[in-house]
Amino acid sequence: MEPERFICRTCAVQHAGYEREPEQCKICTDERQYVGWQSQQWTTLSQLKSEGFQNDIREIEPGLSGIDTRPHFGIGQRALLVQTDAGNVLWDCIGYIDDATVERISALGGIYAISASHPHFYGSMIEYSHAFSNAPVYVPEADKEWITRPDPAIQLWQDSVELLPGVTLVQCGGHFPGSAVIHWAAGAGGRGALLTGDTIAVVQDRDFVSFMWSYPNLIPLPGSEVRRVAAAVRPYQFDRIYGGWWHSVVESDGQAAVERSAERYIARQQSLP
Ligand SMILES: [Zn+2]
Ligand SMILES: [Zn+2]
C-alpha cells in the first residue's frame, strides 16, 4: 500500500511528504495564498475520513457535474467533471477522495484526464489519477515549480491541448504563468462553456468577471496580463462561464462579459494617477 501523503488543511493541496509533516506548505507560503490563522496544519485522507468528511457530487447541466467536500475543506472549491462520449475530464481538483467518490465518478464514466486552472486547485489530483488507472494529469510547463507531489502521471503542456474532442485546455497566464481554462464546446446546450477557476474569476455581479494576481490578498494584475488572458480565450466560442465555486457562474453572454470586464479593469488602472 502507498504511504499516506500529507494534505495542507488550509489549501487542501497534497504534498509528497509522508514520513513527517512538511515544514511548510509551498502553496500557502506564496504571496498569492496565506497560511491558515491556526498556523500551518496538515492532515491525511484517512484522518479526514475519520473526521466524517464526504464528497458531494451533483449534476450542474447535462454533461457537467460538480464535486465538493462536506464539511467545508480547504478553500471550499468544487471540482468539475466534464462528461463526453469519448471520456471524462476532471477539472480543478479537491483535496478529499474516498471509495464512495470513486464509485460515483465510475458510475458517471470514470476519468480519462485531469487538469486544473492553477496550483490552488491541485488538491489531491495524484490520488484521483491513481484511483482511475493513472489518468494523465496535465500541468502547464510554466507552473511545474508548483508541483507538490511529483508523479509519472504528470504530463507537462503549453499553449493549448485538446484533451478530448471539444474539450480543450487553453493557457492564459495572469494569476499564475500557466493559469488555464477549459473550453467545452458542447457546454451550455451547445453554445459553449468556459471552465475558468481563478484564471477568469466570476465576481459577485455575474455579468462581469475579474483577473487578479492574488485574490485573498487583493493584489491586481497589470493591464498587459489582463489583455493576454482576454486574448487567449477570444478564439473560442462560449456563452457560459463556470468559475471555481458552485455559485460563480456567468449564465450567458460570457464572451462579451470577458471583453467588457477586461476593458473596465484596464480603464480603471489607466485612470489612476
Ligand atoms: Zn496550503
Ligand atoms: Zn487562485
Image (spheres, grey):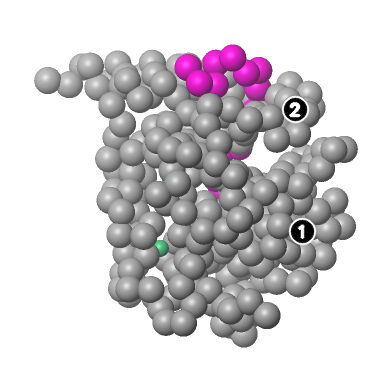
- Where, by quadrant of the figure, is residue 49 drawn? bottom right
- For this view, does 260 lie left or right of residue 35? right
Between 124 and 65, the residue placed more toward the observer is 124
Between 195 and 128, the residue placed more toward the observer is 128
Look at the numbered disc 1 and give the secondary structure of its residue: loop
User: What is the three-letter code of the residue carrying label 2?
Assistant: Gly
User: What is the three-letter code of the residue carrying label 1?
Assistant: Ser
Name which residue lies at 81% across and 61% down: 104
| Residue farthest along the bottom direction in this orientation | 50
Spot occupied by residue 36 in the image (x, y as percentages of width and height): 34, 67
Residue under circle 1?
A: 133
| Residue farthest along the left direction in this orientation | 273
Residue under circle 2?
A: 166
Spot occupied by residue 105 in the image (x, y as percentages of width and height): 79, 57
- For this view, does 169 lie left or right of residue 189? left
Spot occupied by residue 212 in the image (x, y as percentages of width and height): 36, 36
Q: Does mark 1's beta carbon lie closer than 8 Å to ligand 1?
A: no
Between 69 and 153, the residue placed more toward the observer is 153
Residue 177 falls inside the magenta stretch: no
Spot occupied by residue 145 in the image (x, y as percentages of width and height): 40, 49
Q: Is residue 171 above or below residue 10?
A: above
Q: How busy is the neighbourhood of tag 2: few (under 14 within 10 Å), some, or many (20 plus)?
A: some
Task: Write down the region rendered in magenta.
Answer: 231-250
The quadrant of the rendering that contains the N terminus is bottom right
For ligand 1, the image quadrant comes to bottom left
Name which residue lies at 29% across and 35% down: 220
Q: Which mark is residue 257?
A: none
Camera-near label (2 vs 1) is 1
Between 154 and 43, the residue placed more toward the observer is 154
Upstream in sequence: badge 2 or badge 1: 1
